[in-house]
Image: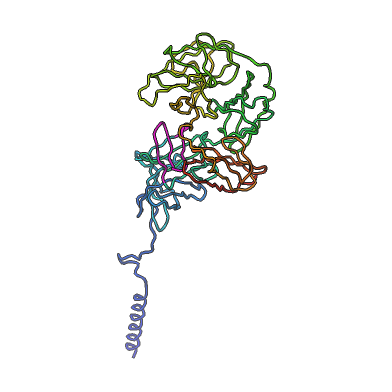
Amino acid sequence: MRKTRFLISWIMVVLLCSACTVNRPNTVSGASIDTGFVAAVPGNYDSADTAVLISRDMEAMTMCFLNLELGRQYTLCYDGATTFADKYGQGMSLEQVQDGDVVNVTFMKDRKRLNSLQLSADAFVMPQVENFTIAANDRTVILNGEEYTCSKDLVVLSDQGVGELMDVNSVDVLRICGSDHTIYSINVMKGHGYLRLENDSYFIGGWIEVNQRQICPIESDMLLAVPEGTYPVTVSNSGSTGTATVNIMRNEEYSLDVSEWQGETKFGDVIFTVTPGSARVYVDGKVVDISEAVNLPYGIHQLIVMADGYTTISKYIKVQTEDSNINIVMEQATDATDLESVSTNGTISTNTSVSTNTSVSGNVSGNTTPTETPSLVPSASPSPSPSPLPSTNPSASAAVASNTYQVTITAPEGVEVYKDGSYIGLTPVSFAKVEGTYVITLRKDGYQTRSYTITVDNAEKDINYSFSALISI
């Protein structure tokens, strides 16, 4: 009986243990259960892409990219296992990566985790571009005489976030990234503010020079888009001139009172030495006799030098001493389009607005000259086009004017509109359609001033622009 009870108890224990063994998870077997977890270590990725870095959030540890092929944006998170490298594969820190860079990335698509980032070896970077020409409508940019095409998904970055190509102003300093002759990103490293002259009635019709890069005639109620930074501004008219140092803040307006510079007219004698001797010299649109010193009022003057068989020179000079010398050596024309002719009446129409690149001290061609020489400022405009009466207007040869077709700024309503710094009215406002590139500035008290670069074509139809509402300040 006792043996029977012991046998029954032993059988029950065996059965109970067997049941527990069946229900218990297999933790000893070599087979594992897929939990979906992937360790965050270098080399764990399932996707790769070439993209533009749009932005990063250092606090959230995320980076936003734009796919170059499809133009889609996506965000990836990074961690301590994410690797960063330059285009040669050498390690670099996250701080060395800049917004707008063209990069190759690997990542886990489902987890949105960035595994690696490397600067693209096929991309170019132009870190500080100051001299460029933008045709916003056909999305082309001229850099160092070469034409580049903007990607259809071009990324334009500034302190205000992601913008458009028309937000870029010709006075801005840019960082440009791309590949071959395609631009993928433009980062505005130094933007622009706005300059207004006060008590300037005496100087209307004269000239203003900004940072030795911009020269334009002074008009009533001007508002010029000018580079941010600290630099000199010079105004002149009828022999009176003055210079002040201004500090321009990005997107802010600066007022300069020029009343104290109105005074006695001063003149300086300028001796021109020109090679070849057959050249004709024009100052402010009129031919001058360079066989003796030319007496010119202090200030800025437009200089044009022409000779048969030579490339025309178009510059600005700044007379600021009683006696000075200018040495000019012309280059022989290498193409028929470089040859110029001039009317026998001895006059040439003057330019209305020219942006300038640098200030050249001494001469036009690069030869040395005596001291006390007027500043010579090279013009950014092309040489006058061949005609019986050539014009120095940069767009004169291509411009198409119409009394019928108009460019209209429709929005935002009730704001001041300036075209290349000249006030044209309150929106909605129109101006005659003339082919060319223009800076349109919108202003209203209590709001942040904005400017846009537009390119007007020569098509026989009206154009309407509607811009975003100004931001309240």
**Where on the picture, by quarter, is residue 258?**
top right
Q: Is residue 172 visible?
A: yes
Tell me residue 459's x, y (percent): 46, 43
Q: How many marks?
A: 0
Q: Residue furthest left?
A: 30
Q: What span is in magenta?
A: 127-151
Q: Residue at x 46, y 45 (%)?
A: 155
Tell me residue 440's x, y (percent): 56, 40
Q: Residue furthest bottom?
A: 1
**Where on the picture, by quarter, is residue 312?**
top left
Q: Residue at x 52, y 29 (%)?
A: 354
Give above or below for 55 relative to 199: below
Tell me residue 219's x, y (percent): 62, 30
**Where on the picture, by quarter, is residue 103?**
top left
Queried whether the magenta region covers residue 139, the answer comes back as: yes
Give above or below for 432 relative to 214: below
Q: Main secondary structure of the magenta part?
A: strand
Q: Is residue 41 visible?
A: no
Q: Nearer the viewer, residue 282 or 363?
A: 282
Q: Nearer the viewer, residue 126 or 333?
A: 333
Give above or below for 208 relative to 298: below
The reply, left or right, for residue 265 in relation to residue 62 is right
Q: Residue at x 52, y 8 (%)?
A: 292
Tell me residue 27's x, y (percent): 35, 67
Queried whether the magenta region covers residue 150, the answer comes back as: yes
Q: Quadrant of the N terminus?
A: bottom left
Q: Nearer the viewer, residue 144 or 236?
A: 236
Q: Nearer the viewer, residue 49 or 44?
A: 49
- How was the colour assigned to the protein in this rendering? rainbow
Q: Quadrant of the C terminus?
A: top right
